Amino acid sequence: MEEVNDTLCVGIDLGTSRSSISASNGERHVVDSYVGWPIDMVARKLVKKSVLVGRDALDNRPMLDLRRPLERGIMKDGSEKDQEAVQELVRHLISLAGIKQKGKNKPKVRAVVGVPAEAFRVSRQNLRSTIEGIADSVMMVSEPFAVAYGLEALLHALVIDIGAGTADFCVMQGRYPTEEDQKTLPNAGDSIDEQLMKLIRERHPDAQFSIHMIREWKEKHSFVGEPKGRVMVAVPIKGKATEIDVTQEMRSACESILPPVCETLTSLLMKVEPEYQDKVRNNVILAGGTSLIAGLPAAVTKALNELGGGRATVVNDPVFAGSDGSLAIARDASASDWDRLSL
Amino acid sequence: MAGIDETKVQLLRGIVQDNINGLRDVRVTRIKRRKARKRSWLWAGWIAAGMTSLMVTLSVVPKADAPAVSATPVQQKTAVANVDPAAQAETLSHPRPFDRGTIPLSIKTVVIDAGHGGEPGATSESGLTEKEITLDVALRLRRLLKNAPFKVLLTRETDRSMSLDKRVSFANENKADLFLSIHVNWMEPHSIRALETYYVGPTDDPATLKLASRENKDSGYSLSDYKKILEKIYVDVRRDESRTLAYTIQNQLFRSLKASNPALENRGIRTAPFVVLIGTQMPAILVEIACLSNEDEAKLLTTEDYRENIALALAKGIRSYAKALKVADRKAVN
């Protein structure tokens, strides 16, 4: 609620594919969640950095020990290198927001970090320990809850935050959501990528492509429902650049997340008090990078119609909805609350 | 707007409380670790005094399903004010951390579990099955450990089916001190050649969950059951030992196989909810020694030399772990 001059609040959405930061100084940034270290001295001389983050890391990936340190929105377990990668990623985000991390005038950083709705307590602890030293105080919140808080959709709303690693659901009923109000599914952007890769490989066994190419195609052309045109992509086949039609594969892969998403939506709706179910059905909010799939809100609305009618909408800024919501929480928490959470 | 503001205040209270509970866990873990280090010196003297103190020490090592232990002074001191009683009870019920150096331990029995049997498990495109490879490597490993100062038992010695709970009972009934389950992976994309070693613990990795669900087939539980069980047993005292064992075996395997399999990827040690790791009462690991989905690696597996190399690396790893355990004991007693 109060913010002194030497204190900065940040909301961070650490995503499997992209991570974003919204800061109280007005800065907002998003980076690809990749961190890489040069594999040898030659690579280090070429890239001229000891560690690369985001697009920079992706573009130089042949020369790097490249990490995507978050899986299903949480730190991978069992690898110190991934832990280090998360630290580098958070440091990078904070520096992008123009926040000094060393020196005399280094401000106090209060960070709210979004985690999947059903993340294990131990996973939250690991993440908290990893961020120690980078931020002065840290709060973890469930990602869809952060989105709901930022939009002030606190009552009779259902938020579905579909990222790369997870689809997180949260029903807002005017109280702090319990385990019963939240759900996490692994069917999200990455599962679409895997499906798309499998389908294209089946139909074009000689085509050469990587998971990074698959992701780029999906970001440009993803859709559910009837196609608006053909989806053509260029791939080398036996060394020759060739255009292939992947319209059907794209549709099938994107639509693969619809059944589990709609099933989970229904199961959460059933837990809402009967008199409020209608209101919640009409206030389904989609957020996260994967919610940008063309036709997705219409497909979810169609599923809601089978339950008696409803409406699903996508937030205005799906990429920053999580970090903006986290920032709102960071700003609204009182100084005494933050003091209790100092690391 | 006033209504919303009041709602926000309530919500913020919930967030802060939830985080304070989480933060307390981190603080308690840190303090417990520091105290455990100090305690091990004091307890070393105790252990030298005889069996009585050993029994006392053992009584503080609870099983996963044991009732809650009483609060330690450390935990009481670090409990943050205004925490709700339910959350407090949950934290206090965790078993105390356990330093293995405080009890002289040695390995007397090793159980080797050849994954699958009867049913084939993973099958390569050329028809090579996981059950054949795991049994072959297990039999080789037993031969290589013939002169070791411990007994080696196999869960199966022929191509027969054996349920996962029977494998667990076999190890527990034979009072095994170490359990090693051998498996061969199947991964997408098929270009992957990876080496992985698992010990018990929760995971959020979808690929690991998929693998666990495949290896746990026909166990009778659902994956959501495991998640709940694992939250409770996360601080299981076996976990640290299993992690050390997993690390030793994984490193040994990678070092030994890299030369003959240059494209091999070291995926390190990971946690996963495999039934055989949850049910066993001793340090236990599951090793994915190769990927049958990769045809080149499947070809390597058809050669005796490569399978012998795998068995040799596993034998070296087990001996090295056993040796390290003895050294740790000697240090603690001295």
Image: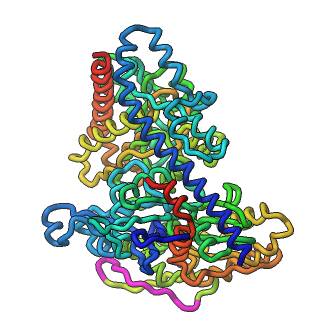
Decide which of A163, A136 is in the foreground and name it.
A136
- Residue B301 locus on image (x, y percent): 34, 44
- Residue A161 locus on image (x, y percent): 59, 70
Decide which of A36, A232 is in the foreground and name it.
A36
Which residue does the image show at 34% across and 39% down from the upper left?
A: B247
Which residue does the image show at 43% across and 48% down from the upper left?
A: B185
Farthest bottom residue? A229
* Quadrant into which the N terminus of chain A falls: bottom right
Please tell me whether residue A238 belongs to the stretch shown in magenta: yes
- Residue B212 locus on image (x, y percent): 52, 47
Looking at the image, can residue A207 be seen?
no
Q: Is B103 displayed left or right of A40 in the figure? A: right
Looking at the image, can residue B139 be seen?
yes
Task: Give residue A186's quadrant in the image.
Answer: bottom right
Q: Is residue A78 above or below residue B189?
A: above
Q: Find the magenta span and give its range.
A: A228-240
Task: Give residue A94's quadrant in the image.
Answer: bottom left
Decide which of A120, A265 is in the foreground and name it.
A120
Q: Is A108 displayed left or right of B9 in the figure? A: left
Decide which of A334, A138 is in the foreground and name it.
A334
Which residue does the image show at 19% across and 72% down from the upper left?
A: A47
- Residue A19 locus on image (x, y percent): 44, 70
